[in-house]
Image: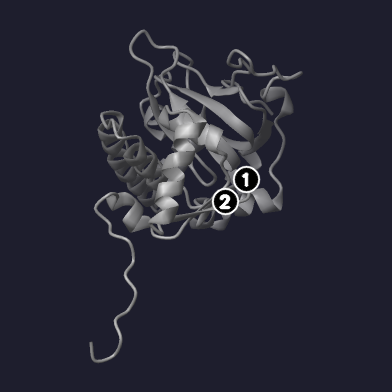
Amino acid sequence: MNFANASSQAETGAASPATSLRQRARAATAQELAAIPWLALLDPQQRAKAVAQLEVADAQVGERICKIGKKANYWFGVIDGLLKMSNDDSSGQAITFTGVPPGGWFGEGTLLKRESYRYNIQVLRPSIVAGLPLEMFHELLEGSIAFNRFMLNQLNERLGQFIAAREIDRISDPDLRVARNLAALFHPQLYPGVGSLLRITQQELGYLVGLSRQRVNQALNKLAERGLISIEYGGLRVLDLQGLRCFPQVMPAVSALPVGA
């Protein structure tokens, strides 16, 4: 087995792994397979064939799963951990498009067109990454109506996500940037593995939103004061996703009035 297109190149300051991602590829465990949302949509024969070709690997901080200009040979997903999608190596202004938390699968547009990547995907924290080979991806598209529906919804949600990301990139208010980026990471369709608790540090969130850890801390405290999130050990819990999406318009909760008031 191999992740033929995965790169082990790391950012400056990140420790290089002793072996490449493809050398660490292995078969998925039952628990890891249960975390892949689209597998349950397949009929038994399709599922068995997909499972036989799925590969997973433990990715280290700084490794690149996808790299600008490399041919796409796999459809990738995050079983656990956190990745960053950006254009860091492009000739234009550096932009972080989005983070990819657990449950997220990405690169389908590139695979559909059989193109090379136009972005980098880099590991922000130790992660378990899964890959489905290109030809198996296209076989499922051709033979499974349920998989096609999943993919159509995925592309539709992704389009909305990137339109929002473009708007976020123009926001100068740090609190609003943090709120919008957090809301995107809790997207229930694109990232079903997150649930209500996202395992992320303030430093990692800073990498995604382009702010210092200290400024992210200030923004998170403000969101917590508004009752939108709670800051917990090792992560953030969303308490009001719609409020997070609408921040700062959302108002603090008001205590109920006495009966007869």
Q: Secondary structure at mark 2?
A: helix
**Residues at marks 1 and 2, CA–CA distance in whole angstroms:** 6 Å
The residue carrying pointer 1 sits among few (fewer than 14), some (14 to 19) or many (20 or more) residues within 10 Å by Cα, namely some
The residue carrying pointer 2 sits among few (fewer than 14), some (14 to 19) or many (20 or more) residues within 10 Å by Cα, namely some
The amino acid type found where label 2 is placed reads: Arg
Q: Secondary structure at mark 1?
A: helix
The amino acid type found where label 1 is placed reads: Val
Q: Is residue 79 visible?
A: yes
Question: Residue at the location (62% across, 46% down)?
Answer: 234
Q: Is residue 43 left or right of residue 17?
A: left
Please identify the residue farthest to the bottom as the structure is shown: 260
Is 128 or 10 nearer to us in this picture? 10
Task: Specify the quadrant that holds the N terminus.
Answer: top right
Task: Specify the quadrant that holds the C terminus.
Answer: bottom left
Identify residue for label 1.
51
What scheme was used to colour the molecule?
one colour
The reply to whether callout 1 and callout 2 are in contact (CB within 8 Å) is yes
* Residue 178 coordinates in the image, percent (x, y): 39, 39
* Residue 56 coordinates in the image, percent (x, y): 65, 37
Is 26 or 68 nearer to us in this picture? 68
Q: Looking at the rendered structure, which numbered label has been put on residue 47? A: 2
Q: In the rendered image of this protein, does residue 214 appear above or below residue 117? A: below
